[in-house]
Image: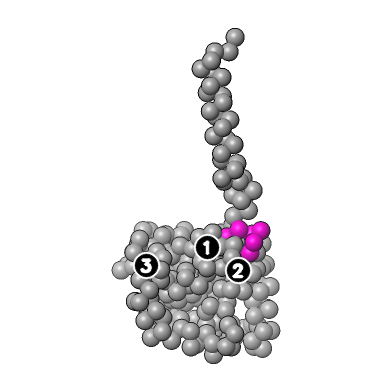
C-alpha cells in the first residue's frame, strides 16, 4: 500500500519536471553550441555579437595562453576573447563566423584598430573538426568576397584552450558604460576601418 506521503512526493516531482520542460525545453539545451573568438577589444566584439538573433550569451574573457587565472593586468600570452553561446536552430556556426569576420580587420595580425600587441590579434579558436572545416570554408568565402588570396587574411586558427572569464566590470561594458564605450570605440577608429574594409553596408 503506497502511503499518501509517497503519492504526494511523486506528484511534486512530476509537477517540477513538467515545469522544467515548459520553461527550459531539453531541445533548446541540446542545440546550444559554443564559439570562441578573439578580435581586438573584447568590449566591442562582445557587443557586436551578443545582439545577433540566436546568440544566447556573449562573455568577455581570456584564452590562448598558459597563465592560469589571468587578469586584465596580467594575461601575457592570452588574447582578449569572447565566448559565444548560440542556438544553432536560429544561427548556424557558419553564419556566426561570417558575422565575426565583418566585425574585425582581417588584414591585421599585430592587433586590431588602435589596440596593438598579441593580446588583440584576431584568432578563431575551434573546439572540434567540424568547426575547423567550417572555418576553412568561410575563410575561402571571405577571400573571394574581398578578392584577395587566402594568404592575405591574417586571422589565425587555433585549437581551443581554457577560457577564463574576465573581471565582472568588463562584462556588458557597452551596456553599463555607454558614454565611455562609444567614446573609446569612436576614438579607436574601429567603425571607420570596418567600413573601409567591408563597405558602407557592413
Query: CA gap, disc 3 to disc 2?
Result: 25 Å
Q: Which quadrant would the N terminus be assigned to in this image?
A: top right
Packing grade of label 1 (10 A; few <14, some 14-19, many >=20) is: many
Earlier in the chain: of badge 1 and badge 3, it is 1
Q: SS at mark 3? A: helix
Nearer-the-camera pick, 175 or 108: 175
Earlier in the chain: of badge 1 and badge 2, it is 1
**Residue located 63% across and 53% down the image:** 31
Query: CA gap, disc 1 to disc 2?
Result: 9 Å
Q: Which quadrant would the C terminus be assigned to in this image?
A: bottom right
Residue 139 visible from this viewpoint: yes
State the residue position of label 1: 84
Name above or below for residue 66 compared with residue 149.
above
Q: SS at mark 1? A: strand
Image position of 8 (left or right of 66): right
State the residue position of label 3: 176
Name above or below for residue 137 compared with residue 130.
below
Q: Which mark is residue 96?
A: 2
Residues shaded magenta = 84-91
Query: CA gap, disc 1 to disc 3?
Result: 19 Å
Q: SS at mark 2? A: helix
In the rendered image, residue 85 lying in the magenta stretch gets the answer yes
Packing grade of label 3 (10 A; few <14, some 14-19, many >=20) is: few
Mark 1 touches mark 2? (CB < 8 Å): yes
Q: Which residue is at the far left?
A: 73
Q: Nearer the viewer, mark 3 or mark 2?
A: 3
Mark 1 touches mark 3? (CB < 8 Å): no
Identify the image quadrant of residue 72: bottom left
**Residue located 59% across and 49% down the image:** 29
Amino acid at each position: 500500500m503506497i502511503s499518501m506521503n509517497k503519492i504526494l512526493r511523486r506528484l511534486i516531482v512530476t509537477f517540477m519536471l513538467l515545469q522544467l520542460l515548459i520553461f527550459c525545453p531539453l531541445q533548446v539545451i541540446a542545440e546550444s553550441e559554443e564559439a570562441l573568438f578573439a578580435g581586438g577589444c573584447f568590449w566591442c566584439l562582445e557587443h557586436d555579437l551578443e545582439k545577433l538573433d540566436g546568440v544566447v550569451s556573449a562573455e568577455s574573457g581570456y584564452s590562448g595562453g598558459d597563465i592560469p587565472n589571468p587578469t586584465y593586468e596580467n594575461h601575457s600570452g592570452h588574447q582578449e576573447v569572447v565566448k559565444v553561446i548560440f542556438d544553432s536552430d536560429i544561427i548556424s556556426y557558419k553564419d556566426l563566423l561570417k558575422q565575426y569576420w565583418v566585425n574585425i580587420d582581417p588584414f591585421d595580425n599585430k592587433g586590431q584598430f588602435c589596440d596593438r600587441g598579441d593580446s588583440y590579434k584576431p584568432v578563431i579558436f575551434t573546439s572540434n573538426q567540424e568547426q575547423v572545416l567550417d572555418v576553412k570554408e568561410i575563410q575561402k568565402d571571405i577571400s573571394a568576397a574581398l578578392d584577395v588570396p587566402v594568404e592575405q587574411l591574417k586571422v589565425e586558427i587555433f585549437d581551443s584552450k581554457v577560457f577564463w572569464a574576465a573581471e565582472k566590470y568588463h562584462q556588458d561594458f557597452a551596456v553599463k558604460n555607454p558614454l565611455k564605450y562609444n567614446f573609446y570605440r569612436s576614438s579607436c577608429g574601429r567603425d571607420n576601418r570596418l567600413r573601409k574594409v567591408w563597405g558602407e553596408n557592413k
